[in-house]
Amino acid sequence: MTRLLLADDEPNPLGFNFAELVLVLIVFGLLYYLVNKYVVPQFEKTFSLRRDAIEGGIARAEQAQAEAARLLEQYNAQLAEARTEAAQIREGARAEAQRIIEDLRAQAQEESARIVSRGEEQLAAQRGQVVRELRGEIGSLAVELSEKIVGQRLSDDAAIRSTVDAFLADIESQQASAGESGRAAGGTTGDSA
């Protein structure tokens, strides 16, 4: 070592100092040990956490995407089912409305027929009543006219009434036969047309 020293006892800048080398190796070893013991595990832990977070995020994103696709498929199925159900409800409502219209139409026709029948019955009853009243009046008018023509009182009301009734029945039968012949004539002209 003395050889490395110059005459002025100045250290040689190019020379090798063993003490410094040992000191540097000890400090390096100590630093290596500390970095390996405390810093590297923290780096590994942080790296692992980041890798797990990234991979977990990707997995969660894939799961969320799969869930969204499943929900979209379920939504589309429910929408199609709702559309089908709505179409069935519309068709049912149309059928129900048509049935109600037909029922109301049938009820209206029945009511109309009942009203017409009742009206015809009332007309027939009124006609019968009018005919009875007219017979009575015609009979009394005929008797009065006969009494005026003859100049005396006709006393047998039963005989007079039977004569008047026979006369009126004869008139009615003539009208009935004239009406039938008129209808028959109208029917033949209607057939020829």
Image (cartoon, rainbow, N blue to C red):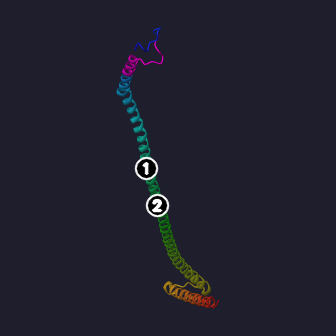
Secondary structure beneath disc 1? helix
- Tell me: 98 left or right of 49: right
**How far from the left and from the top, in percent, is residue 126?**
52, 75
Quarter in which the C terminus is drawn? bottom right
Q: Which residues are magenta?
A: 10-27
As measured in the structure, the alpha-carbon distance from the residue carrying label 1 to the one carrying label 2 is 27 Å
Q: Is residue 22 above or below residue 58?
A: above
**Residue 35 occupies which quadrant of the picture?**
top left
Give the residue type that dot 2 points to: Thr
**How far from the left and from the top, in percent, is residue 170?**
55, 89
Quarter in which the N terminus is drawn? top left
The residue tagged 1 is: 66
Q: Which label sits on residue 130?
A: none
Q: Is residue 35 above or below residue 13?
A: below
Q: Residue furthest top?
A: 8
Residues tagged 1 and 2 counted as in contact (Cβ below 8 A): no
Q: Nearer the viewer, residue 137 or 60?
A: 60
- Tell me: 190 left or right of 156: right
Question: Image point 51% across, 69% down: which residue?
Answer: 105
Sequence order check, earlier mark of 1 and 2: 1
Q: Residue furthest right?
A: 193
